[in-house]
Image: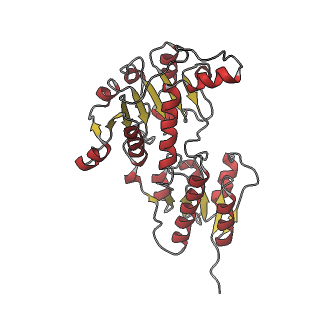
Amino acid sequence: MPKERLSVFVTRRLPEPVERRLGELFDVTLREDDVALSREALVAAVKTADVLVPTITDTIDAGLIGQAGPQLKLIANYGAGVDNIDVETARSRGILVTNTPGVLTEDTADMTMGLILAISRRLPEGLATMQQGQWTGWSPTALLGGRIGGRRIGILGMGRIGRAVAQRAAAFGMQVHYHNRKRLRAETEDEYQATYWESLDQMVSRVDVLSINCPHTPSTFHLLNARRLKLMKPNAVIVNTSRGEVIDENALTRMLRAGELGGAGLDVYENGTDVNPRLRELPNVVLLPHMGSATVESRLEMGEKVIINIKTFDDGHRPPDQVVPAML
């Protein structure tokens, strides 16, 4: 008698090739539209599915996990970050959690450099000038930005993405500095020409560009608070393609409005889609809709990892991208 297929519930629309392959392998429930599920719909899903495939827009907390049926054995997150999932509670209930690490690295690092260039070279202002038909011709003093070659970049979080940013920054002639929970090995520092700072305060006070590349955890919430932001140079640029909660967004907004920072490039926000409206008014700020990893390639590779994790689990083996609390 053939083995009964796993019941898999996917919370958002995924690329068509990914959805098609899921349908070939499992008894999959897909979405008709592409909006975040309500809490009620998520509860219904965990009561019936063997495997849940959520995204960052789904809050899989202790309360939701507590309502899961006994058949739910795997939460295969479509994304690298798992701060939307209570991994500890899931583990205590015998539910495995997996993610999709590694596939977002290059695209997110590219976007980080794009934001650094956009702010440093005042690309939004130039674009607005052209779109509004206000350009009257070249001028020696118009829209003067700053050369990024020779500037110091401070990277907060030297994981995969942080190292990819370091590699790109070095190629642009920037001096690479970093702060991390653990210092990299000497040969790795040499590879990226990176200088380690044990003190985050000392690093942020000396860099010209600060790139946020650490995950959101209880220990990194508001790591860039008002006090620490005030240590930065008044012409420094801050870029965040990681998690919005790492920065005190209100404090950042106040400093930008007061001219106490040179600019900011943000792809993520402290309160999700509820972005501080005062940020939108500032010419030296670039705001993007969480598109750091938004390439066709990364979305397909994320889907492939989800499928491999589910298939490996279905075959009775440990999924390759299993997340355990000790990793967080």
User: Is residue 102 among the parts visible in the rendering?
Assistant: yes
Q: Residue at x 31, y 27 (%)?
A: 201
Whole-percent x, y for residue 306 in the image: 56, 61
Q: Residue at x 38, y 45 (%)?
A: 163
Whole-percent x, y for residue 270 in the image: 53, 32
Residue occupying the far bottom of the picture:
1
User: Is residue 243 among the parts visible in the rendering?
Assistant: no
From this view, report whether residue 66 is shown above or below residue 2. above
Question: 219 or 234: which is nearer to us?
Answer: 234
Q: Which coloring applies here?
A: secondary structure
Can you say which quadrant of the picture contains the N terminus?
bottom right
Question: 122 or 49: which is nearer to us?
Answer: 122
Judge left or right: residue 318 versus residue 79.
left
Judge left or right: residue 93 versus residue 36.
left
Residue occupying the far left of the picture:
186
Question: 63 or 57: which is nearer to us?
Answer: 57
**Quarter of the rendering containing residue 168:** top left
Counting the numbered discs, the total is 0
Judge left or right: residue 37 versus residue 92.
right
Whole-percent x, y for residue 17 in the image: 67, 62
Whole-percent x, y for residue 120 in the image: 48, 26
From this view, report whether residue 16 is shown above or below residue 281. below
